[in-house]
Amino acid sequence: MKSRIIAVFKDLYKVETKNGEINSHITGNMIKSGDFPVVGDKVEVSTEGQIVEIYPRKSVLSRKTSGKAIKEQPIVSNVDYIFIVTSLNKDFNIARMERYLTVVYDSGATPCFILTKADLEEEVASKVSSLEEIAFGVSIHVVSSYEGSGIEEIKSYLKDNKVIGLIGSSGVGKSTLINKLLGNEIIETQEIRGGDDKGKHTTTRREMYRVGEGYIIDTPGMRELQIWSGDTSSSFEDIGNIAVRCRFSDCTHTGEPGCAVREAIESGELKEKRLISYQKLKKEITNMENKVNHGHKYAEKEKIKNMMGSLDMKKKVKSLKK
């Protein structure tokens, strides 16, 4: 029976089926392979109520797992939009939003910026303007859950069974926003902490909610977003458009003659820090790709080594039998 994951609680999964919601587990083989479902996944559920298969994903937002392990951690899947949520007070950080945007473009979903806590910020227009400089063609919505402003704009996305995933740092108001959209205090939230303008992070799991004619997924706040893969060609479209004018097609924009990007910086067309962010993210993505490829090659070498070891052992056993 084809179903959908709507919440994850460690090793327990809440699944939406045609007959209603059930709690389910995955098979031992899925655990062994590390093939764990995430919220948004379309899955096959057996007649016994066990998840036995994950269907191909049309979009998936991933990051690298924390720690030293080189492994992908899917966060949400099969979403149509990903709302990058940041507050307009002390959480507002352009470099972080460039990072989020690079990852979201790579997911296959459509990015959108949600700027919360507008009632706590006096320089809203200037911050929106600075975001527009990096968010080419990306919708930006300013909201205040406290005052209720901007909420109707968000509701306009919740139609035709579209699925929206929310990501952002802890305490930026994701859960408060969902409560406002639901019209109920379903998700626990806490007041802003004194001294730092941040709400206390309370979401500890990923869960999907039905809102109007669509769905919205709340996610725990991210202390860090380690990049697994990213699409800098879309998130830094401005640099790409300028780079086509460089004399050399493989220009690194670090001092080559005829570099149109360096010329754009000198003329004021492009900001130096924008290029620095681009080069930093590009390098980080390339390094991760190299680590992943190295890991695959290492695994293949180990597989061959184990096979050869098994063959040598068989030869030794045969020789002993003679």
Image (cartoon, helix red, strand yellow):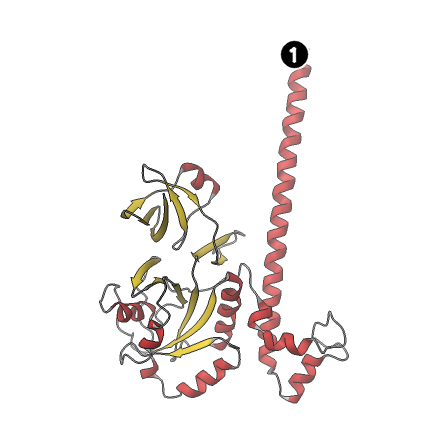
What residue does disc 1 label? 321
Relative vertical location of residue 87 with respect to residue 48 in this rendering, above or below: below
- Describe residue 21's horizontal placement relative to residue 137 as left or right: left
Relative vertical location of residue 258 with respect to residue 82 in this rendering, above or below: below
Quick check: can you spot residue 196?
no
Task: Estimate the x, y position of residue 82 in percent, counting from the top left.
Answer: 43, 66
Position of the N terminus by quadrant: top left
Position of the C terminus by quadrant: top right
- Describe residue 101's horizontal placement relative to residue 258 as left or right: left
Indicate the amino acid at tag 1: Lys
Task: Estimate the x, y position of residue 202 in percent, counting from the top left.
Answer: 30, 64
| Residue 222: quadrant of the picture | bottom left
Dot 1 alpha-carbon crowd within 10 angstroms: few under 14, some 14 to 19, many 20 or more? few
Q: Residue furthest front?
A: 160
Quick check: can you spot residue 121?
yes
Residue for point 26% across, 73% down: 191
Task: Estimate the x, y position of residue 58 in percent, counting from the top left.
Answer: 48, 56
Q: Secondary structure at mark 1?
A: helix
Most foreground residue, 233 or 163: 163
- Describe residue 195's horizontal placement relative to residue 287 as left or right: left
Most foreground residue, 27 or 154: 154
Most foreground residue, 274 or 21: 21
Relative vertical location of residue 109 with respect to residue 31 in this rendering, above or below: below
- Describe residue 312's horizontal placement relative to residue 192 as left or right: right
Most foreground residue, 282 or 57: 57
Q: Residue furthest top?
A: 322
| Residue 229: quadrant of the picture | bottom right
